[in-house]
Amino acid sequence: MALVLSVLHLSAAGLTFTAPDTWKKVATSSSMRVAQFALPHAAGDAQDAELVVYYFGGSGGTVEANIERWVGQMQQPDGRPSSAVAKRQSRTINGLKVTLVDVPGTYVAEMTPGASQRHNSPNFHLRAAVIETTNGPYFIKLTGPAKTVAASEKDFERFLSGVKFAP
């Protein structure tokens, strides 16, 4: 059985990528989100994972600030700081510098930016990437139940490997 992909071209600052057909395109919930997908939940998980592509018009903070914020959105069940379990990696994809972070735990991010209500989602996983372009960074954030994120690993890697930039 061949993997079927559909191409979604973003108009924001020249980034294009290929999203798997199994990812359901979802209407973006804010103007900061240039693309949003629901990734189908794995057997045993009650909810889908979410992948969001953000672009802030060339701003959005440094790579370090974003990684620190993302790591801070996860808590460890044993009380260790999430920075102790987070995995970080840098690579070049199609000429673009990409920094990735991968951290398991309980997802405790704000429900919406600045809100006092927070998620409380144990056994979640966060995978995120900052893609640096000449028009500023793009931010990709994948969150969801741990088994679902693990089941989406190959599709996530294909998605990242297909990212291209043409200013």
Image (tube, rainbow, N blue to C red):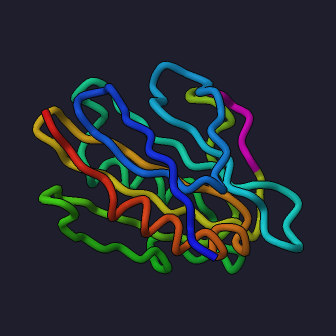
Q: Is residue 19 above or below residue 149?
A: above
Q: Position of residue 11 (x, y in %)?
A: 32, 26
In this figure, what is the number of numbered marks?
A: 0
The part of the image, by quadrant, that contains residue 42 is: bottom right
Quadrant in which residue 34 is drawn: top left
Front position in the image: 8 or 28 = 8
| Residue 87 horizontal/vertical position (percent) | 41, 77
Residue 20: image x %, image y %?
A: 55, 56
Residue at horizontal 66 percent and vertical 74 percent from the top: 151
What x and y, as percent, mark residue 76?
Answer: 64, 72
Quarter of the figure that contains the C terminus = top left
Q: In this rendering, would 106 be left or right of 126?
A: right
Residue drawn at the location 52% of the way across and 43% of the way down:
52
Would residue 157 appear left or right of 47 to someone viewing this image? left
Q: Is residue 64 above or below residue 36?
A: below
Depicted 29 relative to depicted 64: above or below: above
Magenta region, mostly helix, strand or loop? loop
* Drawn side of residue 40 relative to residue 92, left or right: right
Residue plotted at (22% across, 29% down):
58
Q: Residue at 27% of width from left, 54% of height from top?
A: 64
Q: Which residue reaches farthest top?
A: 31
Q: Which range of residues does the magenta coloring cover? A: 115-119
The part of the image, by quadrant, that contains residue 54 is top left
In the rendered image, which quarter contains the N terminus? bottom right
Residue 137 forms part of the magenta stretch: no
Q: Residue furthest front?
A: 1
